Amino acid sequence: MAYNFEFYAPTKVIFGKNTEDEIGKQAKAFGASSVLVVYGGGSAKRSGLLEKVEASLSAQSIAFRELGGIVPNPRLDKVREGIRMGKEHNVDFLLAVGGGSAIDTAKAIAYGLAEPEYDVWELFAHTRTARKCLPVASVLTIAAAGSETSRGCVITNEHTGEKRVYDDNLARPRFTVMNPEYTKTLPDYQTESGCVDIMMHTMERYFTNGGNMEITDALAEGLLRTVMKNAVKLHHQPGNYEARSEIMWAGSLAHNDLTGCGNDGGDFMSHKLEHELGGMFDVTHGAGLAAIWPSWARYVCRECLPRFVRYARNVMGIAIAGTDEEIAEAGIRAMEDFYHSIGMPVNLDELGVHPTGRQIEEMAERCMAACGNHTGSAKKLTLEDMIHIYTNAAKSR
Amino acid sequence: MAYNFEFYAPTKVIFGKNTEDEIGKQAKAFGASSVLVVYGGGSAKRSGLLEKVEASLSAQSIAFRELGGIVPNPRLDKVREGIRMGKEHNVDFLLAVGGGSAIDTAKAIAYGLAEPEYDVWELFAHTRTARKCLPVASVLTIAAAGSETSRGCVITNEHTGEKRVYDDNLARPRFTVMNPEYTKTLPDYQTESGCVDIMMHTMERYFTNGGNMEITDALAEGLLRTVMKNAVKLHHQPGNYEARSEIMWAGSLAHNDLTGCGNDGGDFMSHKLEHELGGMFDVTHGAGLAAIWPSWARYVCRECLPRFVRYARNVMGIAIAGTDEEIAEAGIRAMEDFYHSIGMPVNLDELGVHPTGRQIEEMAERCMAACGNHTGSAKKLTLEDMIHIYTNAAKSR
């Protein structure tokens, strides 16, 4: 039985080689006249991409300022700095150059500039709903977060250690330029973490106890199989352009809501549990997800067994006979083998994180507070459940 | 090897039961103040849908006028009538209630009203490019054409018998309201023709000689398998809401370009050959496609063999050993069996159309003229090729 749904993914995607030459033209078409260019570390400079982007803007007589230095698990202070700059220079358009951290920072700045009378963190604390947002676009260089087409935005308050998400269609990027060539400079660990993150965006929507459509499942399963195949290919041939194209486009489709149409909103507890890890230990998001998922999956699978069996059969290719529990477990084990095959961890020890009992309790408490009423669909988790999942993840396999 | 691509599917989809109550609110959000409601025959009236739509507009203080009587293979004269009405009543928004014919008529009127200084048929004659288009939206009641999310628009000039397409993102609908309940009143033959049309939109993008992405193929194959399964289900249980949901959503995804990302633009010759049939004999579009496709497929498959083999394996489930030619032929035969299983024709005789040799030549000549340089990807067709395909389709199986 499918639920009613809305699907709205208006982002214009310009995909392929040399597409960065289009940026100025697209920004102009979408109404930009004063742009804040938000980027991360030096790689956008070293690769020459930033220079190309800015030349492309200048060619259309679009003014711009730079805000660099965005880090993974992007920080609230940087958002505030961007809002100050934006006010000062009458910025009317945000252009992120990078991955999810740059895009999410740009989205948060866009919210802040559109309603400057409020503190932007109120959105992430869920004490306020946005009514406006400046237009955002991106030049994507990391295939992972899916923020280039999603309504999501994740910011970490470095003063409190809270990593929080705010979701609204207002922040869906107007366009995204995606040239897979630029993902080649990423360290392999980042590429592989990205593949995990992409799969998890669709898996979060897949493991639910309500509202599954056959067409949505068919698309999700096809996407997951394609990502797995190409992740392994990239592990051995990081320079393979075709494989990078497959992963990059899958990353956008995995999180633009296509793979959740008709469901109940998805589970998303692996993400929320990982957010607390990220807030406390600053781990790479995708690797953190890989380290949490097997523990989550084993803990909840009895309450969502038909979906775990379907996953084992249709995604992991498990062909053995057995009870549903055995087939589900074989699927989870195959997923761990896949993670290992691309150099990803399957528990916290392999991730290099060793939380104390007190730290686990603290993460679980924070997770519970961040969740509100949304504590999962495969299984609605209690505080104790969360502690168990972290604790099991902390044991070696 | 994938080609560069643009993907832009901004239509907001509101899907499920009772979603028609949203129409006024959505129209207002998208800026409507004076709406022309475009619909077909009496079913929109009989079902009470039209009344609901208009009440929903009135509740938001949106003015509206009605233009009814749109027929399948919608006519240019009706478009001109709509343009006259639109000018008279300062219409600023087009709302189609119905299927592809109503939506395409609304799109054509929207072009005509946005640039009233030109004759709208110039677009379809490809002697002019549109620069503007009024906003269009739809309340969909037939799962088939995919026009609710596509950039396409097909109009028949009843004075010349020309059925012509004009494609532009300008006409992509702003939103579409899709309640599968309203498709239940369709005659079975229309439902089944719709399923063929939906599959063909993705098959036209699948059978190409260039630019295939694994992720695109995976989505296309999953979509096709889902439509086949649910088409058979609906053939036996026309009132099945879940099956209608699957088909309806697949219809939008099959033609919003998702299943063509990275390809060379697709083949689309079955559609173009059928357009001439539709122009000359006024057949139901999907049934016409079913009657043409096997002849087209057998004629071109040697020049696009890897795709036909892949199709046989991954969509039709052909598991036999054999030469590539044998596997491809088994796939085509299985497709014919599927068409028959849902009451669809596989040649012109079964369609009830018996063109003379001169009529076949005339259709081929018109098709050639309409194609310009785009005469296919699986195989670029000549005039003689087209005559052969029509002639073979005219022979019984």
Image: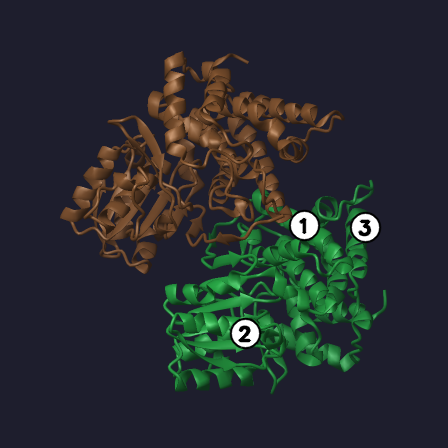
Chain colours: A brown, B green
Which residue is nearer to you in this view: B52 or A294?
B52
Query: Whole-percent x and y of residue A226?
Result: 58, 37
**Label 1: few (<14), some or many (≥20) within 10 Å?**
many
For marks 2 and 1, give the one nearer the viewer.
Answer: 2
**Residue A181 in the image: above or below residue B157:** above
Residue, x 32% and y 56% (percent of image)? A25
Which residue is nearer to you in this view: B381 or A316?
A316
Q: Secondary structure at mark 3?
A: helix
Q: Residue furthest left?
A: A88
Tell me which chain the residue with mark 2 is part of. B
Q: Which residue is mark 3?
A: B330
Tell me the tag on residue B50: 2
**Label 2: few (<14), some or many (≥20) within 10 Å?**
many
Alpha carbon of mark 3 to alpha carbon of mark 2: how far? Answer: 46 Å
Residue, x 28% and y 33% (percent of image)? A70
**Residue B186 in the image: above or below residue A71:** below
Q: Quadrant of the C terminus of chain B?
A: bottom right
Q: Secondary structure at mark 2?
A: helix
Going from N to C along the chain, the mark reached first, 3 or 2, is 2
